[in-house]
Image (cartoon, rainbow, N blue to C red):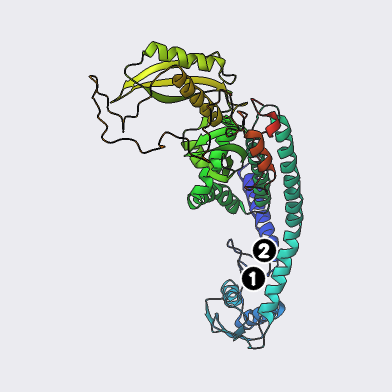
Amino acid sequence: MRRVLALLFYGVLTCVACVSADTAEAQPFGTAESTDGTIGAPGKVDVLPAARDDEIRRRLLDILEATGWFPSFEVAVRDGVVFLSGEAETAEVRQWAGNLARNTQGVVAVANRMTLRPPSAWDFGSASDGLAQLRQDFLLALPFFFLGVVVLAFSMLTSWLVVRATRHLLKHRVRSRLMRGVFAWTIGAFVLLAGLYIVLRVSGLTQLALTIVGGTGIVGLALGIAFRNITENFLASVFLSMQRPFETGDLIEVAGETGYVQQLNVRATILMTLDGNIVQVPNATMYKESIRNFTASPNRREEFTIGVGYDDAIDKVQEIALAVMARHPAVLREPEPLVLADALGKATVDMKIYFWFNGSEHNNLKVRSSIIRLVKRAFQMRGVTMPDEAREVIFPQNVPVVIVGSKPPGADAPVSGGTHPVEPSDAVSTQAEAGLSSDAGTLRAQARGLPSTGSGDNLLKPETTTRGR
């Protein structure tokens, strides 16, 4: 039994040795390659169980000749020591020859005396190899290029469709056209950036893709700081178009300017002032300053002060002034007008008169002038005094005045050719006041005749749809 097991174990070892030998002999000498991708020499080259120097030399010469890598070479073997001489194209090939000799059976040591062949000044082999490599890289990159073009074109088309669809969806949900545009283009930009990111990832430029995506916010921040005023006005236009404190054609007062709104663009608000001038107020100022909108509510209140004498009864003065305003067609009954004692001056009792009128139909300056004129005439007709604080002094106990001298002859006679005194008028509006109607229509017509003001589209609705019209 022991003999049978021994024979079987010996047979297995013999088969393994035969397979290993066959595999080693079948491996080509030029196919060995190291783990780092460089050219590697065969692990072992067997000649004969007891190789002689001439056999080692002949075997190495055959191998080196078969490679064609060495322009000139010589192999010498003495007592198992291999001496290599000649020229090699590259350092990698020279090292390969040394490893080949070192792994040959029967070799004790290797003296590699090969030198590197100096490159010729007219040798364009490297340039040719470089061009060939570029050509190969270009051919390999062509599929990615065409794929990137297709993906980018599809992203641009998708972005355009998304912008249009977003505008359509927000048309009845967001009143501001500017906000609809901002939302639409923001979503479209994200779609386009996603397509660009996919293109760079497919092309193997992952780091560049991450840099572009991460740098977009940094670029936006830098642009925001560099163009702070422009950005501030743009953001203010966004908020104004959302909040809509005024509409086209409204009469507003802001930052010391009073006028009718003509346009709101991304930079400024255009006003037509009451004296017919065009004023551009930056949107940042419009957003920060207080805005008085006289058109938001058609009813407006005006006031003026008039001083009456101390001898006049205040209640009588109030009744006279209220009667004048009750008869005036421009004064509203609700809210009712007021006549209030405001202060006790040096020579007068100051009366404050308040009244309301429709600002969309009447001009505040004309209505105020008409009421002041009519109240003054009523006071004069009813004997109400209106002293002048600067020139009139009141003496309660009367001061006797003695006139020295006599009047010159004919002093009381009318002057020939003199002008006749003008009788006070009880008319609501005089020719000088030119009616009580508002001048808004005239100013709007004048504004429409002017060339285009500002830049960009009007972010407000047309004037025909504004409130109070």
Query: What quarter of the picture does the N terminus occupy?
Result: top right
Write down the quadrant of residue 346 in the picture. Answer: top left
Asked if residue 29 lies left or right of residue 228, the reply is right
Residue 291, relative to residue 345: is it above or below? below
Q: Secondary structure at mark 2?
A: helix
Asked if residue 73 lies left or right of residue 230, the reply is right
Q: From the top left corner, tell me how far across and down residue 147 is, in percent.
A: 75, 52
Q: Which mark is residue 332?
A: none
Q: Residue at x 55, y 30 (%)?
A: 366
Q: Secondary structure at mark 1?
A: loop
Q: Residue at x 65, y 65 (%)?
A: 32
Compute the Cα span from label 2 to label 1: 9 Å
Q: Nearer the viewer, residue 200 or 312?
A: 312
| Residue holding disc 2 | 24
Q: Nearer the viewer, residue 219 or 38?
A: 219
Kind of residue at disc 1: Asp
Residue 443, relative to residue 22: is it above or below? above
Query: What quarter of the picture does the C terminus occupy?
Result: top right
Q: From the top left corner, tell me how far across and down residue 151 is, in percent.
A: 74, 48
| Residue holding disc 1 | 46
Q: Nearer the viewer, residue 85 or 328?
A: 328
Write down the quadrant of residue 15 in the picture. Answer: bottom right
Would residue 221 be seen by someone viewing this image from the given angle?
no
Kind of residue at disc 2: Ala
